[in-house]
Amino acid sequence: MKIALSKQWTFLDYITVLKPVETSLLTFIGICSAFIAAAGYPSAKVFVLTLIAIFLGSAGSNGLTNYLDRDVDARMKRTSNRALPSKRIYPPQKALPLIIGLILIGLALAWMLHPLCFLFGIIGVMASSIWRKTISCTFLGIVAGCAPVLIGWFAVSPAFDARILLLCGLVAIWTPIHVWTVMIANREDYLDAGLNYFPLSWQVKDVVKTLFGLSILLYLVSMFIYIAADFHLLYLIMANITGGLMIYANASLLFSKTSIAAWRVYKLSAFPYLGIIFLTMSLDIWLTSGA
C-alpha cells in the first residue's frame, strides 16, 4: 500500500512540474483561437490535432520553465514546496525526458498542422527557456503567451488579418497585468530571494499606476476586437463586464497598494478574465455563424 501511494504521489509531482493550470489556460485560448479562425466550425481532425499539439507543447514549455527556475524557486516561500526545488523529484534531470518529449511531440504535431504553427511553437519554447527571472521575462512571457493563439489560428486560417493581431494584442497587454500583480503580491519574497528586476526595482505606487493604465488599454483592445471581428451582443456584454471588473480591481489596487489587492487582480486576470473573454468570442461566433 505504501509503495502504491508513493508511486501515486511521484506521478502527481511530475504532473505539477508541467503547471497543469497554466497549461490548461494556454491550451484553452489556443483552441478558442482556432474556433474563431474557422468561424465556429473547424474540422474535427484539425481541432483535435491542434488541441493535442498546443496542450503537449504548453505542458513541456511550462515544465521547462519550472526546471530552469528550480534554484530560485527554492529560495522563495511561495514556490519552495514545488516538486523540483523541494527535491521530491531528485535529481531534477529526471524530469527532463518527460519535458523534452512533450515539447518534441507538440512541435511534430504543429508541423503537421502548418509550418507556421511549427515556427510559432519553436518561438514559444525559446521564449519560455531564455533569460529566466530577468527584466526580459515579461516580454518573453508575452511571446510565449501569444504562441498558442497563433498556432490555433494558423492551423485553420494561414493568413494574418486584424483579428489575430488584436487577439495577440489582448494577450500582450494582459500578460504584464497577470505577471506583475503576482510579483507585487509576493514582493518581499522575490526581494529576499535576490530578485530585483523590473517591476520589483520600481516602487509599488509607480507600478500600480502603470497597471491601472494597462487595464484601461486592455478594455479598449477588447472593444476594438468587437468592431474588427464583427462580434455581436453576447461578446459586447461580456467584454464590458469582464473589462469593467479588471479596471475596478486595478483601481482598488491603485488606491490600496496592498498585497491582497494585487493577489485579487492576479486571480481575476487568469480564467475569470482571459478564459471567459476567449470563451465568449468562441460562443458568439458559433451561435451567430449558424444563424
Image: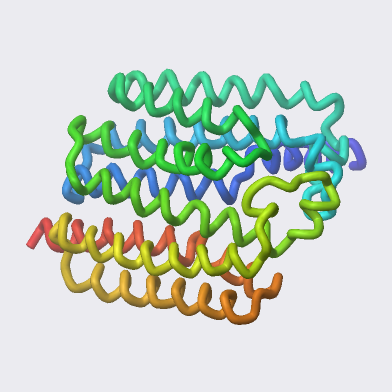
Does residue 207 appear to the left or right of 213 in the view shown?
right
At 33% from the left and 37% from the top, the residue drawn is 150
Q: Position of residue 80 (x, y in %)?
A: 84, 47
At 65% from the left and 34% from the top, the residue drawn is 132
- Residue placed most toward the observer, 197 or 234: 197
Does residue 121 appear to the left or right of 204 in the view shown?
left
Does residue 93 appear to the left or right of 221 in the view shown?
right
Q: Residue furthest right?
A: 2
Q: Residue 154 is drawn in which quadrant? A: top left
At 45% from the left and 37% from the top, the residue drawn is 143
Q: Position of residue 277 (x, y in %)?
A: 36, 62
At 59% from the left and 81% from the top, the residue drawn is 255
In which quadrant is the N terminus drawn? top right
Q: Position of residue 126 (x, y in %)?
A: 53, 26
In which quadrant is the C terminus drawn? bottom left
Does residue 23 appear to the left or right of 44 in the view shown?
right
Query: Is 237 placed above or below 36 here?
Result: below
Query: Is 257 placed above or below 281 here?
Result: below
- Residue placed most toward the observer, 89 or 199: 199
- Residue placed most toward the observer, 210 or 98: 210
Q: Position of residue 159 (x, y in %)?
A: 18, 32
Query: Is 84 placed above or below 286 here?
Result: above
Q: Residue furthest left?
A: 291
Q: Residue 96 is drawn in which quadrant? A: top right
Total tally of numbered discs in the picture: 0
Name the image colouring. rainbow
Q: Residue 78 is drawn in which quadrant? A: bottom right
